[in-house]
């Protein structure tokens, strides 16, 4: 483990040092500009020095950091070189003034920290080499006197001082790199408003994906269940009742075509292709759905109120899918058992009740599962702020759904 971590640590330190050196190089043009402008001002030498070394370069780098693209570039650089917490950055340009201000502050901090580390990297290694070689070199007396040593200067501690200087330089590089890595997400990361917007966008995207998944499950799942039963019925009476077999095959074709249309509609939404997004079925198409179910061999006792044609479009679309999924559940889990459907408007609500006997264990339909049907119905009811009950009822299975009509407005 140690043998693996040491090379990784060395690479991380090297990359962070590179990040700091790049910052130091970027600050040099601002200093050169200050050196050309500040001396002409009628001020004292101390004030000029402060202006040249700190004030002017700091203000100039902060203003440069306000450029939206700078945040994108600095974020990419920090993500690639700083590692650690900065590795989780998602580079992006600044879109608000708050993000621009944070990017400007980061740009200033990066460049000034880079100048300090770059200066130490240039000065400390040669000085450390001199200290390391001092005991083995015969120094000229004029060089020694220039440093204030006349008769004797102790040379034996100098190698330790040289090593200490290199250790301090390494500690400064590591510390500065680690500090910038921790600060990068705060300065270059998303603001609270941006995080909230990202969460909302993700929630919207997830809700849309769930809606499309329900559409596929309800439409294609129902079609496949009906087609399976219709094909089985047609096969059994192909010789004895060719007319019924032909009718069943026609229903299979119609069910498959409807499923393909629904699939094409969902794929068009996924591809954001407006030309391939056909209108979704509503309660106006309920007659065809019930007829397909009857052709599949299900004895369906339906009572649909005439007023359901006036149901708002959003409620009508969801109600159609709820009825479709209820019929699919009956076919899958109970088989060809009698199904009773009641659908109508009562006051300001759309009421739906569907019931069927439970199929025999191991009988037709009992082997087909999935487990998502009731969850899909419950999600649709929840979206429309309706109410739903489902469960065993007097030896059968009963689903009751109540949807407020105003939820479609």
Image (cartoon, grey):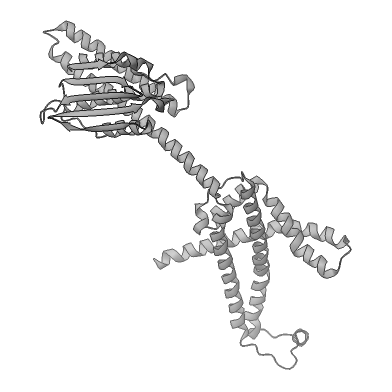
* Relative to 94, 200 lies left or right: left
Q: Could you say which quadrant of the image residue 44 lies in? A: bottom right
Q: Residue at x 75, y 91 (%)?
A: 150
User: Where is residue 42 drawn, in percent x and y?
Assistant: 89, 63
User: Where is residue 195 drawn, in percent x and y?
Assistant: 51, 47
**Which residue, as the protein is rendered here, is positioned at the far top?**
243
| Quarter of the figure with the C terminus | top left
Q: Could you say which quadrant of the image residue 25 lies in? A: bottom right
* Relative to 336, 178 lies left or right: right
**Residue 296 at least partly seen:** no
User: Where is residue 326 drawn, in percent x and y?
Assistant: 25, 26
Q: Residue at x 59, y 74 (%)?
A: 168
Image height check: is 253 above or below 188?
above
The front one of 196 and 111 is 196
* Relative to 228, 261 lies left or right: right
**Which residue, as the protein is rendered here, is positioned at the far front?**
347
Q: Residue at x 17, y 13 (%)?
A: 234
**Residue 213 at least partly seen:** yes
The front one of 244 and 301 is 301
Image height check: is 331 above or below 253?
below
């Amino acid at each position: 483990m140690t043998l693996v971590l040491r090379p990784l640590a060395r690479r991380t330190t090297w990359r962070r040092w590179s990040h700091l050196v790049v910052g130091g190089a970027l600050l040099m043009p601002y200093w050169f500009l200050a050196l050309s402008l500040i001396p002409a001002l009628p001020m004292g030498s101390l004030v000029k020095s402060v202006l040249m070394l700190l004030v002017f370069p700091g203000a100039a780098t902060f203003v440069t950091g306000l450029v939206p693209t700078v945040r994108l570039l600095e974020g990419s650089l920090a993500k690639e070189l700083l590692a650690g917490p900065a590795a989780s950055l998602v580079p992006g340009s600044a879109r608000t003034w708050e993000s621009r201000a944070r990017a400007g502050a980061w740009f200033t901090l990066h460049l000034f920290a880079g100048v300090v580390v770059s200066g130490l990297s240039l000065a400390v290694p040669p000085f450390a080499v001199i200290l390391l070689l001092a005991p083995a070199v015969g120094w000229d007396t004029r060089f020694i006197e220039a440093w204030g040593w006349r008769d004797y200067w102790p040379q034996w501690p100098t190698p330790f001082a040289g090593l200490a200087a290199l250790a301090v330089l390494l500690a400064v590089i590591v510390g500065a790199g680690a500090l910038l890595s921790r600060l990068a997400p705060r300065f270059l990361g998303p603001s609270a408003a941006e995080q909230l917007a990202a969460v909302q966008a993700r929630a919207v995207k997830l809700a849309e994906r769930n809606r499309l998944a329900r559409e596929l499950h309800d439409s294609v799942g129902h079609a496949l269940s009906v087609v399976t039963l219709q094909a089985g019925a047609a096969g059994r009476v192909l010789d004895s009742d060719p007319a019924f077999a032909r009718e069943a095959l026609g229903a299979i074709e119609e069910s498959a075509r409807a499923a393909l249309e629904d699939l094409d509609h969902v794929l068009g939404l996924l591809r954001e292709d407006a030309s391939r997004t056909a209108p979704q079925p509503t309660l106006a198409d309920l007659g065809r759905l019930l007829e397909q179910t009857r052709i599949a061999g299900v004895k369906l006792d339906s009572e649909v109120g005439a007023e359901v044609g006036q149901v708002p479009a959003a409620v009508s679309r969801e109600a159609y899918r709820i009825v479709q999924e209820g019929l699919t559940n009956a076919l899958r889990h109970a088989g060809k058992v009698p199904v009773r459907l009641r659908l109508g408007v009562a006051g300001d609500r759309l009421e739906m009740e569907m019931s069927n006997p439970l199929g025999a264990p191991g009988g037709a339909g009992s082997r087909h599962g999935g487990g998502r049907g009731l969850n899909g119905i419950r999600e649709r009811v929840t979206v429309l702020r309706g109410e739903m009950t489902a469960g065993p009822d007097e030896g059968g299975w009963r689903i009751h759904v109540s949807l407020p009509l105003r939820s479609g407005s």
